[in-house]
Amino acid sequence: MSIYTFLVISHIIGTILGVGGATFAEIHHTRALKDGQIDPKEGKTLKVTYSVIRWGLIIATLSGFGFLLLFRLTGEEERLLDPKLWAKMSIIVVLITNALLLQMHKIPMWLGASISLTSWYGALILGSWRSYPYSYVDTIIGYVIAIVLVAIALHFIKRIYFKK
Protein backbone atom coordinates (compact mmCIF):
# COMPACT_ATOMS: atom_id res chain seq x y z
CA MET A 1 0.00 0.00 0.00
CA SER A 2 1.37 3.39 -0.95
CA ILE A 3 1.67 6.27 1.52
CA TYR A 4 -0.90 8.21 -0.51
CA THR A 5 -3.44 5.35 -0.30
CA PHE A 6 -2.84 5.01 3.44
CA LEU A 7 -3.44 8.75 3.90
CA VAL A 8 -6.63 8.64 1.81
CA ILE A 9 -8.02 5.70 3.80
CA SER A 10 -7.04 7.32 7.11
CA HIS A 11 -8.60 10.62 6.08
CA ILE A 12 -11.84 8.93 5.05
CA ILE A 13 -11.99 7.00 8.35
CA GLY A 14 -11.40 10.20 10.34
CA THR A 15 -14.09 12.02 8.39
CA ILE A 16 -16.58 9.17 8.81
CA LEU A 17 -16.00 9.11 12.57
CA GLY A 18 -16.35 12.89 12.78
CA VAL A 19 -19.46 13.25 10.62
CA GLY A 20 -21.18 10.24 12.18
CA GLY A 21 -20.14 11.24 15.68
CA ALA A 22 -21.31 14.83 15.27
CA THR A 23 -24.63 13.65 13.87
CA PHE A 24 -25.24 11.18 16.68
CA ALA A 25 -23.99 13.62 19.33
CA GLU A 26 -26.73 16.03 18.31
CA ILE A 27 -29.36 13.27 18.23
CA HIS A 28 -28.31 11.84 21.62
CA HIS A 29 -27.98 15.28 23.23
CA THR A 30 -31.41 16.37 22.02
CA ARG A 31 -33.02 13.12 23.22
CA ALA A 32 -31.24 13.36 26.57
CA LEU A 33 -32.52 16.89 27.18
CA LYS A 34 -36.15 16.10 26.40
CA ASP A 35 -36.85 15.52 30.10
CA GLY A 36 -34.73 18.52 31.12
CA GLN A 37 -31.73 16.61 32.45
CA ILE A 38 -29.04 14.20 31.34
CA ASP A 39 -29.11 11.02 33.44
CA PRO A 40 -25.93 8.93 34.00
CA LYS A 41 -26.74 6.44 31.20
CA GLU A 42 -27.31 9.27 28.72
CA GLY A 43 -24.13 10.94 29.95
CA LYS A 44 -22.13 7.77 29.24
CA THR A 45 -23.57 7.57 25.73
CA LEU A 46 -22.66 11.20 25.07
CA LYS A 47 -19.17 10.68 26.47
CA VAL A 48 -18.55 7.78 24.08
CA THR A 49 -19.98 9.77 21.17
CA TYR A 50 -17.74 12.76 21.93
CA SER A 51 -14.74 10.39 22.11
CA VAL A 52 -15.58 9.11 18.62
CA ILE A 53 -15.66 12.71 17.35
CA ARG A 54 -12.29 13.46 18.99
CA TRP A 55 -10.69 10.39 17.44
CA GLY A 56 -12.14 11.35 14.06
CA LEU A 57 -10.69 14.84 14.43
CA ILE A 58 -7.28 13.49 15.44
CA ILE A 59 -7.15 10.99 12.56
CA ALA A 60 -8.41 13.51 9.98
CA THR A 61 -6.00 16.19 11.18
CA LEU A 62 -2.95 13.90 11.25
CA SER A 63 -3.72 12.45 7.84
CA GLY A 64 -4.32 15.99 6.53
CA PHE A 65 -0.87 17.02 7.73
CA GLY A 66 0.43 13.84 6.11
CA PHE A 67 -0.98 15.01 2.78
CA LEU A 68 0.68 18.42 3.18
CA LEU A 69 4.02 16.78 3.94
CA LEU A 70 3.66 14.28 1.10
CA PHE A 71 2.84 17.01 -1.43
CA ARG A 72 5.84 19.03 -0.28
CA LEU A 73 8.25 16.08 -0.35
CA THR A 74 7.07 14.79 -3.74
CA GLY A 75 7.32 18.15 -5.50
CA GLU A 76 3.56 18.65 -5.79
CA GLU A 77 3.62 22.08 -4.17
CA GLU A 78 1.03 23.41 -6.62
CA ARG A 79 -1.55 21.25 -4.81
CA LEU A 80 -0.83 23.30 -1.69
CA LEU A 81 -2.22 26.41 -3.42
CA ASP A 82 -5.69 24.93 -4.01
CA PRO A 83 -8.38 27.27 -2.54
CA LYS A 84 -10.48 24.22 -1.62
CA LEU A 85 -7.59 22.88 0.48
CA TRP A 86 -7.23 26.22 2.30
CA ALA A 87 -10.99 26.40 2.91
CA LYS A 88 -10.95 22.88 4.30
CA MET A 89 -7.98 23.69 6.53
CA SER A 90 -9.74 26.82 7.78
CA ILE A 91 -12.83 24.78 8.59
CA ILE A 92 -10.69 22.26 10.50
CA VAL A 93 -9.12 25.10 12.52
CA VAL A 94 -12.64 26.34 13.36
CA LEU A 95 -13.63 22.76 14.27
CA ILE A 96 -10.66 22.35 16.63
CA THR A 97 -11.26 25.78 18.19
CA ASN A 98 -14.96 24.99 18.59
CA ALA A 99 -14.16 21.67 20.30
CA LEU A 100 -11.81 23.39 22.74
CA LEU A 101 -14.33 26.15 23.50
CA LEU A 102 -17.09 23.61 24.07
CA GLN A 103 -14.82 21.59 26.36
CA MET A 104 -14.06 24.72 28.41
CA HIS A 105 -17.76 25.75 28.43
CA LYS A 106 -16.89 29.08 26.73
CA ILE A 107 -19.44 28.76 23.92
CA PRO A 108 -23.17 27.97 24.09
CA MET A 109 -24.05 24.41 23.18
CA TRP A 110 -26.51 25.49 20.46
CA LEU A 111 -23.75 27.41 18.65
CA GLY A 112 -21.10 24.75 19.22
CA ALA A 113 -23.40 22.04 17.86
CA SER A 114 -24.20 24.12 14.78
CA ILE A 115 -20.52 24.81 14.11
CA SER A 116 -19.59 21.17 14.67
CA LEU A 117 -22.26 19.73 12.36
CA THR A 118 -21.65 22.30 9.65
CA SER A 119 -17.88 21.92 9.86
CA TRP A 120 -17.87 18.13 9.65
CA TYR A 121 -20.36 18.04 6.78
CA GLY A 122 -18.53 20.93 5.08
CA ALA A 123 -15.22 19.05 5.30
CA LEU A 124 -16.93 15.94 3.93
CA ILE A 125 -18.40 17.85 1.00
CA LEU A 126 -15.13 19.64 0.20
CA GLY A 127 -13.20 16.38 0.36
CA SER A 128 -15.68 14.60 -1.90
CA TRP A 129 -16.29 17.30 -4.52
CA ARG A 130 -13.54 16.70 -7.09
CA SER A 131 -14.02 19.57 -9.54
CA TYR A 132 -14.77 22.22 -6.95
CA PRO A 133 -15.38 25.52 -8.81
CA TYR A 134 -15.55 28.05 -5.95
CA SER A 135 -12.96 30.41 -4.48
CA TYR A 136 -11.77 30.42 -0.90
CA VAL A 137 -13.86 33.50 -0.07
CA ASP A 138 -16.99 32.06 -1.71
CA THR A 139 -16.52 28.85 0.28
CA ILE A 140 -16.05 30.61 3.62
CA ILE A 141 -19.09 32.85 2.99
CA GLY A 142 -21.15 29.73 2.18
CA TYR A 143 -19.79 28.03 5.29
CA VAL A 144 -20.82 30.92 7.58
CA ILE A 145 -24.27 31.03 5.98
CA ALA A 146 -24.55 27.26 6.45
CA ILE A 147 -23.71 27.59 10.17
CA VAL A 148 -26.55 30.10 10.58
CA LEU A 149 -28.98 27.90 8.63
CA VAL A 150 -28.01 24.80 10.63
CA ALA A 151 -28.47 26.73 13.90
CA ILE A 152 -31.95 27.81 12.79
CA ALA A 153 -32.84 24.28 11.62
CA LEU A 154 -31.66 22.73 14.90
CA HIS A 155 -33.64 25.31 16.87
CA PHE A 156 -36.86 24.40 15.07
CA ILE A 157 -36.17 20.65 15.21
CA LYS A 158 -35.73 20.91 18.98
CA ARG A 159 -38.87 23.02 19.39
CA ILE A 160 -40.89 20.43 17.49
CA TYR A 161 -39.26 17.49 19.32
CA PHE A 162 -39.70 19.00 22.79
CA LYS A 163 -43.40 19.73 22.15
CA LYS A 164 -44.12 16.02 21.58
Image (tube, rainbow, N blue to C red):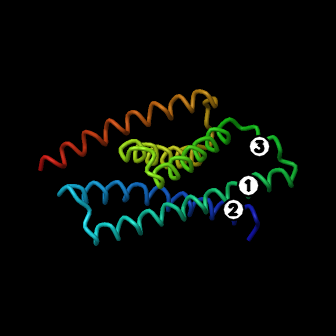
Residue 67, numbered label:
1
Front position in the image: 86 or 127: 86
- Residue 35, compared with residue 48, is above or below; it is above
Say which amino acid is labelled 2. Leu
Q: Residue at x 40, y 41 (%)?
A: 111
Q: Residue at x 79, y 55 (%)?
A: 69
Q: Decide if residue 78 is on the left or right side of residue 9.
A: right
- Residue 143, compared with residue 19, is above or below; it is above
Crowd band around label 3 with a 10 angstrom C-alpha radius: few (<14), some (14–19), many (20+): some
Q: Residue at x 56, y 32 (%)?
A: 140
Name the N-terminal-most of marks 2 and 3: 2
For residue 139, what is the image quadrant? Answer: top right
At mark 3, the secondary structure is: helix
Residue 79, numbered label:
3
Mark 3 vs 1: CB contact within 8 A: no
Measured Cα–Cα span from mark 2 to mark 3: 15 Å
Mark 1 vs 2: CB contact within 8 A: yes
**Residue 82 image point, x, y percent:** 72, 38
Crowd band around label 1 with a 10 angstrom C-alpha radius: few (<14), some (14–19), many (20+): some
At mark 2, the secondary structure is: helix
Measured Cα–Cα span from mark 1 to mark 2: 7 Å
Q: Residue at x 44, y 35 (%)?
A: 146
Residue 91, numbered label:
none
